Image (tube, rainbow, N blue to C red):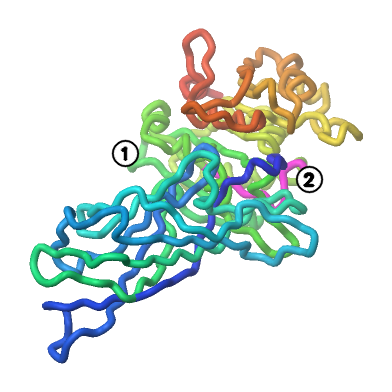
Amino acid sequence: MSTSVTRRTVLAGGAGAAIGLVLPGPAAHASGRHPTSVSFTLDATTLDGGEQVTSVTLDTRRLGPIDPAGLTPGTFSVHAKATSPIPIAPGDQIFSEYDLDRTVTAARLDRHGNIVLELSHAEGQPGGGTLGYILSRGRNVRLDLVYTITQNTPIVRRRGSPVTISRFVQAGLSNPEVDAFSYHVSGSGMKYRLYSPDHSPRHDRRPLIVWLHGGGEGASLPDGYYDNETTLRANRGALGFATPQAQRIFSGAYVVAPQSTSYWMEDGPRFAPLIREIVQDLVRRKRVDPDRIYVVGCSNGGYMSLEMTSTYPDLFAASVPICGVVEPLSGEGPPLITDAELASIRTPTWLVTSRDDDTVPPETNTIHAHDLIPGSLISLYDHVVWDGYQFPGHWSWIYVARNDPSLNGTHIWQWMARRRR
């Protein structure tokens, strides 16, 4: 349940357009020059802190062989505008909207002859994110992105005269890791994304990893915003298990990311059977090994991981609750997971959190759960730091997404992969 305002660096997928193309030489009509459109794609990458647009690809294949030596960072300029896809109420706030120039760090040709404009980006750097965080709702939404491309100098071709583009038309947003997850809706109406491993002999059944998102990645109802994608764009939680490294460790695994219609903590007992329905349907329809189903969740989803193993003690081979919520964050009311429920959990459990988590205090939540769950393991970090960048203390899911937690020389993915129901 990621409710920290600073949490959001996120994504937008957008509309957008800009200017067009004057194409002299062989591609022009016999009557002379004429405007020609060139489309472009926004290329995104989900960083540990959220998805960012990291480059723009111009569809320039039909212009003929382009001389790469004539491309420089100054050949094109890029402007980006990101706005909320839903109305923001007076007095409310949305974080990560922007209207600014993106710095082009390099211009190159890809193997298809398209021009790729590399854009400056980094963890915590504003102006490239694709998600916005609406404060009153505690939710991320995919921003509407409008990118404007301006050509500053002609494109030099190996044959024919230089080209000056006069019209650019924005196409879609491409993130290969996100796009590898297919879109589905369960019989009860819960949306989910599914990564399927490479094909194998029909008798070879595969593990299933269930990723349960944080509070900011659920739907924003009743305004109808239920996108089935922020679960993959806000962080690398589900994506990490679909990487080649993880797939080797798990010998090929399905990865499913259900999306709550609100947030799991709102009514965990009601959501639990809806998640189980998705799991059981995948076991029926896919080559899923029912003895190797694992549940992993962060924050709000960490709570839901505990709820699932408490409610369904025989469903999962292992559970990884990350900075999960046990006690109500307001400090008032009954616990979300009682001591008796925690003590009854028999699923092998590895808990992860950071001592400086000021959103879900470790002592009363993760550490308390570890004290009660029989045989549970725990990784307790001091801070959340990756590649030299320090994230908010609540973001300890980054470590699990990178297979960092280890005990006695065994890392958490390998530990999961060895568990059988």
The residue identified by callout 2 is 266
* Percent position of residue 304, x then y: 70, 36
Give the residue furthest to the top: 408
In the image, is 154 to the left or to the right of 15?
Answer: left
* Percent position of residue 214, x then y: 65, 41
Badge 2 amino acid: Glu
| Residue range of the region highlighted in magenta in the rendering | 256-265
Q: Is residue 205 visible?
A: no
Rendered position, 233 above or below 101: above
As for residue 82 lying within the magenta part, the answer is: no
Q: What residue lies at 74% left-to-right and 33% top-to-bottom?
A: 359
Disc 1 from disc 2: Cα separation: 42 Å
Rendered position, 358 above or below 43: above
Which mark is nearer the camera, 1 or 2?
A: 2
Q: Earlier in the sequence, mark 1 or mark 2?
A: 1
* Percent position of residue 309, x then y: 68, 30
**Secondary structure found at label 2:** helix
Badge 1 amino acid: Pro
**Secondary structure found at label 1:** loop
Rendered position, 183 above or below 295: below
* Percent position of residue 404, x then y: 50, 22
Closest to the observer, 332 or 73: 73
Give the residue furthest to the bottom: 31
Q: Quadrant of the N terminus?
A: top right
Q: Is residue 325 visible?
A: yes
For residue 392, what is the image quadrant? top right
The residue identified by callout 1 is 201
Q: What residue lies at 91% left-to-right and 34% top-to-bottom?
A: 332
Circle on res. 357: none
